[in-house]
Each structure stands twice: as C-alpha cells, then as structure tokens.
Amino acid sequence: MEAATPKPVLILGGGLMGLAIAHQLARRGLAVQVLSRRRSEAAGFVAAGMLAPHAEGLNGPLLELGQRSLERIPAWVAQIEADSGLACGLRRCGIVVPFTNAAERDAYPTASWGTPLNRTGLEREIPGIGPLWQAGLLFLQDGQIDNRRRLMRALERACVGLGVEFQEGSEVLELVRDGNGALAGARLRTAEGEQRQLAAIQAVLTCGAWSGQLLPELPIVPVKGQMLSLQGPRQALERVVFGPGTYLVPREDGLLVVGATSEAEVGFAEGLTPDGQRSLQNGIASLLPAASSWPPMERWWGFRPCTPDEAPLLGKSSIPGLWLAAGHHRNGVLLAAITAELLAGALLGQERDDGLLEAFHWSRFS
C-alpha cells in the first residue's frame, strides 16, 4: 500500500517573508505551497532595502533580533544567489544618520555602535549634505540590498528551483479548523473566482499588513508609505543617508531610492498624494540639495504591517499548526533572514531555546 503524500506547508502570503520562509523550508526537504493574492503589492517590492538595526535606533529584543539577522544576511544571500543564479544586490555601504547638533547625536539609542561625526566628517561622508546638519553617526556595519529589483526575483527563482508551488491570484478567505480547533486547511478564492479548500496541518501566516484580516486577534494595522526614485550620477552618493522622516538609498547604478512617508490613519487607501510627494521632495532638499534637480524615475506606495510596539509577531499562534511571521513594520527586509531561520527551525522542531521567538510571541498584546 502506497504511503499518503504528506500535505504541503502552506505559506499564506507571497511577499518577502513568505518567500524567505518557503525557501528555507524547501531547502530542508519540505513540500511547500505559496498562496498569494497579488505579490506585486507585497511590502518586499516596495521597501528601500535598508539593513539598518543601528541606524534605525532599535533597542531591546528588537535590536538583538536585527543584529542577529544582519550577521546572517551575507550567508543567507549567498544561498539565494547559489539557488537562483541571480545577484541580490547586497551592499555593505554603511549608513549615516545626520543630526542638527552633537547633543542629539550623543543621545541616539544606538550611538555607542556608531562612529561620531562632526560637520567636517559629515561633509566627507556625504558630499553636498544640507547646511542644517551639523553632526552625525556613521554605522559602517549597516548597509542595503536591492530588494525591489533583485532580491525578490532571486528568491522567487530559488523557490521554483527547489520545487515550491505557487498559486498566484489566490485570496485566502478563511482558516479552516478541525474539531479540536487545530489547523485543517484554508479556504480560498482562485484567480478564476472559484472557491476551494486546501488541506493542511501546518501553515505560516505571512500576509503583511493584511494578516489581521485572517486572524483578527492580531493587532496589525497598515501604515502607508509613499516613495520615489531619482537617477543620479554614479557614485554621487556612496553611503545611505537616514534622515528624520526621509532616507536616501543609493544603488550602484546611480539610482537613488527616496522614502518614505508614514501615514497611519489612511488604512488601505491606495495611490500617491500631493502632500506625500511634497514631503519627500522637502526631505531631499534638506538632506542633499543637489539631488532636487536629478530626474525622477518612479513613484510608488505600499503598506507596512505595524504592531503597537512596531515589533513583529513570530512563532506559534492561537491555532495549533498555524505559525506567525508578520508585523515587521519598517524592518521586514532586515529581519527576513533571521525570521526564515527561526520559523523553519520551529516548524521542524529544531527551535533553539534562547527565548528569541518567545520575545515576539503574539500573546504580549493579549
């Protein structure tokens, strides 16, 4: 008698977090199926790709999580590049955080991790920086990755090569439970409008800002961000500039990614707004005045998944068999490597007993 084919692990959401976890599970030999309504709306396609636990001024367990992920990113990227044959655009370029005075600089939560800069040092690291900024911190250990153009495509190809199945255009409508309340599958609507049910005993919720729609007890809300890009001269800017309210992320080819507004009260309202775009232009003029004359290339928006403490929800959910990897807010790209490692280990019963997952359990809000 033939053995029953094991049910695949369902990844509910095809953004960066879903792809990263699917890739790690497939590398460990599990059958994986990714259900995605529209991957192009995922935050992984929208974000600027900063790897910045220190420049972001994180603290406590979130800083530790970010630092651990930062350490793992080079090996993680090497895996993805080997499995996909595509470069991911990882750059250890360093990030500068500018301040109006030295007192602000020295009070920054992660100041001890950076190199202090005076005005002369700022001008050396960021030629042409605006006159408002008189001090800074250089975090050489922080960097960036070209998530929008490279990382997401490489992850998709790596997953396909490892046998991950994709159901694009499939909207998960409901989580299905058995008589004991454990996960039994998911009911979904296909791209053709048909409703069907997939059986599963394990799934990972990676729906980003939409995660609370499937599990309303999760305190995840969308925070809209508008962004744009400019085409600058090659090597006009080497470091990322992380200013208050605006950041500038230079790619190797001279493209400058500029972000991002933070609009917490607009829900899932799509589209660009004049106020949002004006805010970005003002930020450019303040941080790097010369860039105001560079030609615009693209403008876009997306939705960050935000929790009340701006930290992710990781690990077990209230439904046995359903795992959480959601609510990463501004740090999804940074935290993808460690999230994929921790969740893959937990699903396979190889979770390390160091309390890291426990620190981000959803029950901290219950």
Image (spheres, helix red, strand yellow):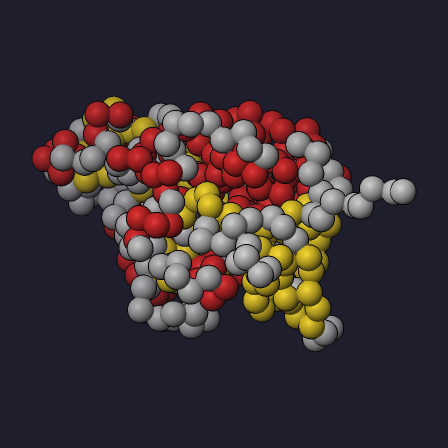
Residue sitting farthest toward the left: 103
At x 69%, y 65%, the residue is 197
| Residue 74 visible somewhere in the drawing | yes
Residue sitting farthest toward the bottom: 193
Q: Position of residue 213 (x, y in %)?
A: 47, 66
Above or below 316: residue 136: above
> On the picture, is 294 further left or further right than 182?
left
At x 69%, y 60%, the residue is 198
At x 37%, y 38%, the residue is 358
Above or below 310: residue 109: above
> On the picture, is 9 further left or further right than 3?
left
Above or below 82: residue 313: below
Q: Position of residue 134 (x, y in %)?
A: 16, 37
Q: Quarter holding the C terminus?
A: bottom left
> On the picture, is 35 further left or further right than 274?
right
> On the picture, is 35 further left or further right than 338?
right
Q: Position of residue 232 (x, y in %)?
A: 46, 45
Q: Quarter holding the N terminus?
A: top right
| Residue 121 visible somewhere in the drawing | no
